[in-house]
Amino acid sequence: MAVLELTNISKHFGAIQAVNDVSLSIEPGQVVGLMGDNGAGKSTLVKMIAGNFRPSHGTMRMDDKELILHKPVEARQHGIEIVHQDLALCNNLTAAANVYLGRELRRGVGPFRILDYAAMYKRAGQIFAELKSETRPRDLVKQMSGGQRQAVAIARTMLSQAKIVLMDEPTAAISVRQVAEVLNLIRHLRDQGIAVVLISHRMPDVFDVADRVIVMRRGRKVADKAIALSSPEEVTGLITGAIEQVA
Amino acid sequence: MAVTVDQTIAQKQHSFLSRLFSSQTFWVVIAVILACIFLSFATDAFATSKNLYNITRNITFVAIVALGMTFVIITGGIDLSVGSVLCLCSMVLAVTMHAGYSIEIGILASIATALVIGAFNGIFIAYLGFPPFVVTLGMLSIARSLAMVASNNTVVFQFGPDHDKLLALGGGAWVFGIANPVLYMILLALITGFILRWTKFGRHIFAIGGNEHAATLTGVPVRQIKVAVYMISALSAGIAGIIETGWLGAVTTNLGNGMELQVIAATVIGGANLAGGVGTAFGAIVGAALIEVIRNSLGLLGINAFWQGTFIGGAILLAVLFDRIRNFRRSD
């Protein structure tokens, strides 16, 4: 059964048709590469799933229930997590503080509730261990490598029972070794039954880790097929428009 | 691989000592202690109980305001209006009590004034997107002018029926001969330290200073928190104003003139970073202490008072220089 199902979704801003009649479904434990040139409508589509925009037309269903999002917090409550392109990390805070930013654990009663440092360090450490990332919860993010920073951002999505994780260009600005680390992190999410939508410009990453590729051009979905049945050449053709559309 | 992932994760990278030695606040404390030891031997007047009483009490007014300023500076903002707000709050207290109202009503009016001004600053900054420098610079001018309007630019030195209570509040020494303002300072420092270290609010203040965009994306109520920090800053100025009124026994519209710079200097010397994200309550107190010890010692050593600014300015640069050197080493 699909964890997320979009039916005939469109979004226009005034006269500009950013997303045009897109339908797709995402299965649990599946990594979907979402590709397309700048302005193809990827970001708009993702922002609708993340609750930043409301679709002009069409419906979204999650676990067979209609999904209507007014703001990003509601998406999070439904188990939709986003890893932002700039990772949204605070350099002056520790890894654990960043993981728990905005949903800090506290202990005590009523107005006398204080931050529960021990519990946050412990849980953050467990998540990093699950991700097989050498990241220390007590270290400042300032001193971390690109791969560790990605691990911190991804660890956030594992605090709650995420069903679907949207990742915006996670491999855009990091070294080759760190790219491998990030792709491993994505596989760990998948192995836990979480659906991952990977928005990327990097063909090798998508073909390395994704199960399926969706290509968008000028607001329309022009391809949606298993990675095994496609090739980088075909996807390039679809992105640029050299190939009009494939089934 | 000899070291597993779990061991790496469990490892603490910094010992207590290494953290201590890398903190600017620690070195400022050492500087204050060394200066005190030196002055005890170099002059007869320094280590007398009367002089120490004076020093500790003089520290308090700058230190209390610096505690409030620390919140603002951690978020990456600045509040230039504190000196004027201190004056206005003093004046509101003085005028209210002079008109025959009780000390409770006077203090209430004074604190309400501070909170309204802080909220005004905060709303302009957080909701209308004005730069903090501009808003609080405007308020610096407005608040002092309002203080002049409230008092018709006269000196108020009679505080109605509760005159003696007010003077005792600011000028007394109720516990072990420690000046009352010092007790208030210690209490406020403990509260500030607690909020910064142990509350969600404190955590979010640091997050805003570190990366405001990230704080917004992760669901931190950035705007409300910004309004709150400017209200805290104005409140601390108001509290300092009330105490200073009681200590001086008179209020002029000149009170707190130029104080904002001393306060900012104290927080920066104590280790706060004007770029945001760093600062402690203890640092604010220690910074204020260093400034006061410098001022006091110059007087005792018979150095012309005109040199004060040079020494305090030098202390600011030196403190930040230490910080720069540490960062250079780290980035190597």
Image (cartoon, rainbow, N blue to C red):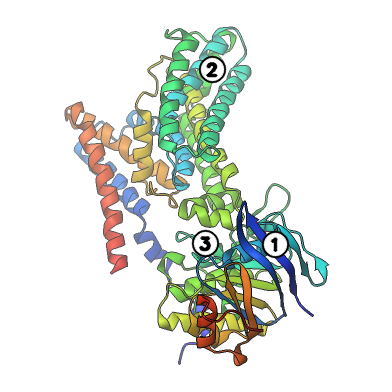
Q: Which mark is residue B116?
A: none
**Residue A91, x across and y down, in percent:** 45, 61
Which residue is found at the position 53% from the left and 70% from the top? A152
Q: Secondary structure at mark 1?
A: helix
Q: Which residue is mark 2?
A: B93
Q: In this rendered view, identify the residue nearer to me: A96 or A177.
A: A177
Dot 1 and dot 3 within a common chain:
yes
Q: Check disc 1 and report the residue beneath it.
A: A75
Q: Is residue B202 left or right of residue B310?
A: right
Across and down, in percent, residue B311 comes to 22, 37
Name the outermost residue toward the left: B303
Question: Residue at the location (45% across, 32% down)?
Answer: B135
* Mark 1 and mark 3: Cα distance apart in space: 17 Å
Label of residue A88 in the image: 3
Amino acid carrying mark 1 in the image: Ala
Query: Would you call the spot at circle 3 few (<14 residues within 10 Å), some (14-19), or many (20 or more)?
Result: some
* Label 2 neighbour load within 10 Å: few <14, some 14-19, many 20+: many
* Residue A132 visible from this viewpoint: no
